[in-house]
Every structure is written in structure tokens, then in C-alpha cells.
Amino acid sequence: MTDREQYTPGPASGAQVKKDGEKWTLILVRELRHAPEKVWQALTDPAHLREWAPFETDGNLGTVGTVKLTWVGTPTPFETRVTRADAPKVLEYNDTRWELEAFGGGTRLTLWHNIDRRFISWGAAGWHIAFDVLDRLLTGIPIGRMAGGDAMKFGGWKRLTAEYAKQFGAEAPHWPPKAAQKS
């Protein structure tokens, strides 16, 4: 068995939401065993992002400016403006903010991501899996990116989505969407 086949996400944890009408902000915290500089590189370098993140970019996110960002499963890139890049502490672009704090020989990584409330549990589950993939990549035991539809096919996806929905007091979206289900 490969490391990817043996991977099982842990229980939903380290997440909360800030609610503001239809737009909710997912706040997800993960402690990584890696230095902030190493985590920063994984958050900003396009080659690293392709290994773990649910999107790709055509340029480095580590400098203020514009890059094209493409979410996994979407055909069209869109312009993304990096508005803050204070290495290795704070990174902001579009509706996403990352904070890196040196902690116990590693990094406490905090993500703020604005997500439509109907899909907040999906976002939490997706980022949970992405953070697991990131941790393994930085440890030198990559298991390959699991994002978009690939993550949704993964065995732990439904469980994580349900656990986060319960924690947030949100309804877990149906998959496949009801309109796509056969009658």
C-alpha cells in the first residue's frame, strides 16, 4: 500500500467560522513541525502549490502584485491580487489570509478564507485534507494533491464534511448536487 492509500484524515478540529450573512469566514489553524520559512515557501511558490493546494498560480504569491490563479476543477484562471506579502508572517490575496507564527520549533499556520455559508463545511473539509497533504509534503513523504473532485471521492471526505457542518451549525451540502442526481 502507498502512503496515499493509507492516509485517513483525523477528526474535524482546529476550525471555527465567523458568520456575516451569506458570507462566512472559515478560520482554520494547524500546527506544523516545520519552520515558518519552509511553510512560507510552500504557500507562495507555484511548484510547491501544485503539490498540495486546491489551486495553481502562474507566479509567486510571495510578492505584492497580480498573478493568475486557477482552482482545481475550474477551467478559467482569474486575476488574483496579492495585497500583502510579509515573509514569513502574513500573506493576503483575494478572500484569503494566511498567518504564520513560530511555535514550538515549528509553525502555527492560520488560514482565514471567506466562503459562502452553504459550502463552509466543504471548504473546511477540503482545507483540512490540503493541510494534511502539505504537512506530508514538507516532511518529505508526499502523498500527492487531493483537491476538488479528487478530494470529494476520498473516503474521509463525507465524514469530515458532516463533522464540520455539525461544529459550525450548518447544513452539509449534498453530493452530488440534487439537480445532478437521477430521479
Image (tube, rainbow, N blue to C red):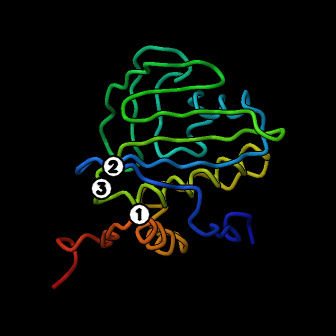
Q: Which residue is mark 3?
A: 117
Q: What residue occupies the far right of the structure in this picture?
A: 105
Task: Say whether marks 3 and 1 touch (CB < 8 Å).
Answer: no
Decide which of tag 2 and tag 3 comes sooner along the chain. 2
Tell me where residue 28 appears, x and y as whole percent. 53, 49
- Identity of the amino acid at label 1? Phe
Task: Say whether marks 1 and 2 touch (CB < 8 Å).
Answer: yes
Element under disc 2: strand
Q: Which residue is mark 1?
A: 168
Disc assigned to residue 24 = 2
Quote the CA–CA distance across marks 3 and 1: 10 Å
Describe residue 48's horizontal placement relative to residue 149 as left or right. Answer: right
Tell me where residue 55 appears, x and y as whole percent. 46, 41
Disc assigned to residue 49 = none
Identify which residue is drawn at 71% across, 71% down. 6
- Identity of the amino acid at label 2? Trp
Residue 166 vs 91, above or below: the answer is: below
Describe residue 35's horizontal placement relative to residue 96 as left or right. Answer: right
